[in-house]
Image (cartoon, grey):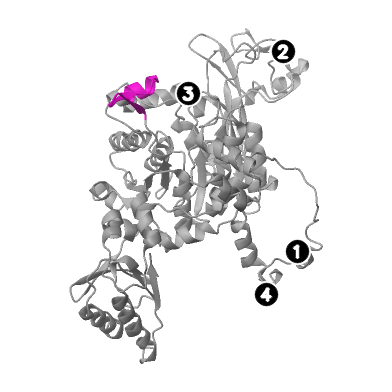
């Protein structure tokens, strides 16, 4: 299969994904020579879409290169962590953790999970110039190759390659890094799904532009403001930035709807007069409205003292007029905190407070900030802060809970410390869901450097703490965080039936030697089978990669089929023959099983081509072809993969 991918990638173009979509939906617009008939295409769009020759878009160095990266397929293989996956808590889990580059991980997932992910949350690198963002996508293109593929001059091609190899923190490098990942993420989203992306001021404007382009402006749901700092502090001498943004896009706004279950659960009180469900909410304006002097007045407390709106005068105010307060005073609630400060609350009825299809603000007290996230990490890691800038699970639970229902899957392909996985497990264990799962992807980014042959932690407090605890890569921290969080959840909810395990997979690039042998391998030679390739990847990796490739996902299992001593692997419509020594007895046993076993009928027989000689392949092909002439009239697709 890698051989076919390498050959296909040689001819890959930036527009391949778009052209495939046009072939699928507008086949009549392609002429016999393969060229695209734009005029006929315009006829299809007539009276539906206004075709313009000019439009607003964000242009950046390497944009077509980014589209090319989304079009070329991954040559990595999926290696299961067999020891981890065999543990009782993990063996049947539907949660997935992938150690590898997320660009490769997304391409693997698309084979099995396209349009199947309900919620995506990502916290990508912010590109602050000091947060360690390093562009690491490298497909070993030369400037000459890239100039031909992208139809650009040599100098432009070299500038693009420089961005990918220097570790540039420029806007173009960051956008080139994010663009292909967001293209692939969109294809993973279910039609009623949505994506949340946290970002700061450095790239907010640029991210909004490329998301408008990729997801469409009409699918923009809004931007949350997340108060990451719940106390004071100064970032610089000009503006004290205490918040980040959460951009939110639907896959298709016409199918998307907010899950109001969690909002409805807040309305637990019943009004004795009307019988309606309600909750108490502050009468004080908590932000978002323009100051009104007429609403800035004192309300008499039960003890006769004056209650003013919390905050500075000239800024804070009440939501009701003085006349309404007097008229409906008995509908208000007055409470005193430990300091003796009076607070005023009004009734909010479910019929008034819930607006289907809309998103509400993130409440500071409920979603937490950086301090809460750091405290969570330290609590799980024996008071060690092993990760910088995690997100609080309270924030992630709040966002995820707005979108998902039972049976959905949440994806985070910048998994980091594993906060998203923790949040999903908490939501399930708390009884909100009985069946909610996650997929995490995290590159094994090193937290150390080698100095004079010895490993030393990077000079960051979190890296030093993690290094001392024995971790060497970010994914190791994330994996252990999930395990520790699961144990904490079990203690808090001993009766829970939540899925608290996960299956671990590692994306592995073939060695240069193997790639060279693949290029030189002649499938039509009469030489003996070459087991070098199977030894390099291992049977479990080949089988797992193929199962994903054929749409069965990362949590499926195969039946072993005994063919006269030869072990084949059967999954629904596919029978996989991977190892060598496929003798004539095995051929006959396979044909006999097709003919006599009424439950056995895979439509595709897939061979690992390197394990079979030309003679063995042809003998099997001919015998399977004969099945079409039998009473069963079986038509078997014969698929040899390299």
Q: Is residue 276 above or below residue 190?
A: above
Left or right: residue 562 versus residue 126 is left
Report how far apart the C-alphas of labels 2 and 4 lie in the structure.
77 Å
Report how far apart the C-alphas of labels 2 and 1 lie in the structure.
66 Å
Using the image as rendered, state which of residue 289 and residue 144 is in the foreground.
Answer: 144
Using the image as rendered, state which of residue 373 and residue 84 is in the foreground.
Answer: 84
Judge the density around disc 4: few (<14), some (14-19), many (≥20) Cα neighbours within 10 Å: few
Using the image as rendered, state which of residue 151 and residue 286 is in the foreground.
Answer: 151
Q: Position of residue 628 (x, y in %)?
A: 39, 88
* Mark in front: 3 vs 1: 1
Judge the density around disc 3: few (<14), some (14-19), many (≥20) Cα neighbours within 10 Å: some
- Name the image quarter holding the N terminus: bottom left
Report how far apart the C-alphas of labels 4 and 1 lie in the structure.
14 Å
Q: Quadrant of residue 577?
A: bottom left
Q: Which residue is mark 2?
A: 297
**Which residues, given as a range, are shown in magenta?**
447-466
Q: Position of residue 565 (x, y in %)?
A: 17, 73
Magenta stretch encompasses residue 268: no
Label 3 vs 1, first from the N-terminus? 1
Please report the residue visible at 46 percent of the width from the left and 26 percent of the height from the top.
389
- Disc on res. 38: 1
- Name the image quarter holding the C terminus: bottom left
- Disc on res. 370: 3
Q: Which residue is mark 4?
A: 32
Please report the residue visible at 59 percent of the width from the left and 13 percent of the height from the top.
236
Label 1 sits on a secondary structure element that is helix
Label 4 vs 1, first from the N-terminus? 4
Magenta stretch encompasses residue 452: yes
Q: Is residue 332 above or below residue 213?
A: above
């Amino acid at each position: 299969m890698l051989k076919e991918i390498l050959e296909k990638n040689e001819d890959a173009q930036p527009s391949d994904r778009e052209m495939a979509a046009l072939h699928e939906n507008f086949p009549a617009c392609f002429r016999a020579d393969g060229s695209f008939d734009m005029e006929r295409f315009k006829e299809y769009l007539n009276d539906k879409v206004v075709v313009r020759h000019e439009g607003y878009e964000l242009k950046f160095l390497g944009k077509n290169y980014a589209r090319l990266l989304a079009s070329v397929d991954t040559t990595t293989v999926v290696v299961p962590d067999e020891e981890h996956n065999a543990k009782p808590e993990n063996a049947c889990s539907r949660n997935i953790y992938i150690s590898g580059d997320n660009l490769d991980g997304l391409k693997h997932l698309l084979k099995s999970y396209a349009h199947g992910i309900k919620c995506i949350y990502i916290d990508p690198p912010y590109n602050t110039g000091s947060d360690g963002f390093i562009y690491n996508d490298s497909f070993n293109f030369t400037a000459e190759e890239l100039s031909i593929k992208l139809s650009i001059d040599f100098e432009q091609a070299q500038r693009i390659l420089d961005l990918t190899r220097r570790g540039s923190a420029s806007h173009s490098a960051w956008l080139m890094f994010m663009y292909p990942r967001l293209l692939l993420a969109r294809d993973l989203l279910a039609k009623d799904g949505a994506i949340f992306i946290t970002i700061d001021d450095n790239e907010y404007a640029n991210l909004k532009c490329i998301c408008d382009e990729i997801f469409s402006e009409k699918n923009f749901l809004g931007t949350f403001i997340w108060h990451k700092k719940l106390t004071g502090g100064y970032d610089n001498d000009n503006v004290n930035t205490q918040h980040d943004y959460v951009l939110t896009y639907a896959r298709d706004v016409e199918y998307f709807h907010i899950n109001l279950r969690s909002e409805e659960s807040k309305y637990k009180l019943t009004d004795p007069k009307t019988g309606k469900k309600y909750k108490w909410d502050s009468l004080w304006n908590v932000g978002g409205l323009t100051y009104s002097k007429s609403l800035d007045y004192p309300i008499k407390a039960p003890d006769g003292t004056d209650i003013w709106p919390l905050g500075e005068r000239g800024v804070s105010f009440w939501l009701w007029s003085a006349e309404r307060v007097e008229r409906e005073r008995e509908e208000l609630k007055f409470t005193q905190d430990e300091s003796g400060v009076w607070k005023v609350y009004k009734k909010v009825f479910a019929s008034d407070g819930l607006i289907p299809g809309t998103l509400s603000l993130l409440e500071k007290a409920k979603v937490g900030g950086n301090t809460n996230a750091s405290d969570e990490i330290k609590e799980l890691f024996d008071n060690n802060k092993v990760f910088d800038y995690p997100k609080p699970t309270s924030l992630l639970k709040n966002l995820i809970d707005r979108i998902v229902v039972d049976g959905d899957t949440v994806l985070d392909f910048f998994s980091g410390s594993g906060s998203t996985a923790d949040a999903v497990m908490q939501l399930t264990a708390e009884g909100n869901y009985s069946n909610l799962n996650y997929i995490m992807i995290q590159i094994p980014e090193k937290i150390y450097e080698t100095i004079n042959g010895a490993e030393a932690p990077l000079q960051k407090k979190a890296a030093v703490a993690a290094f001392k605890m024995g971790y060497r890569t970010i994914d190791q921290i994330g994996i252990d965080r999930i395990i520790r969080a699961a144990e904490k959840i079990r203690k808090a909810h001993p009766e829970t039936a939540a899925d608290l395990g996960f299956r671990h997979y590692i994306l592995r690039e073939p060695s240069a030697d193997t790639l060279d042998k693949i290029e030189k391998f002649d499938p039509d030679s009469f030489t003996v089978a070459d087991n070098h390739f199977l030894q390099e990847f291992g049977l479990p990796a080949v089988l797992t990669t193929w199962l994903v490739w054929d749409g069965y996902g990362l949590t499926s299992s195969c039946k072993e089929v005994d063919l006269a001593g030869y072990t084949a692997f059967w999954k629904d419509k596919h029978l996989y023959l991977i190892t060598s020594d496929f003798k004539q007895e095995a051929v006959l046993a396979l044909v006999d099983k097709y003919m006599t076993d009424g439950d056995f009928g895979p439509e595709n027989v897939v061979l690992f081509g390197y394990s079979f000689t030309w003679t063995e392949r042809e003998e099997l092909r001919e015998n399977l072809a004969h099945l079409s002439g039998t009473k069963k009239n079986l038509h078997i697709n014969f698929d040899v993969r390299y």
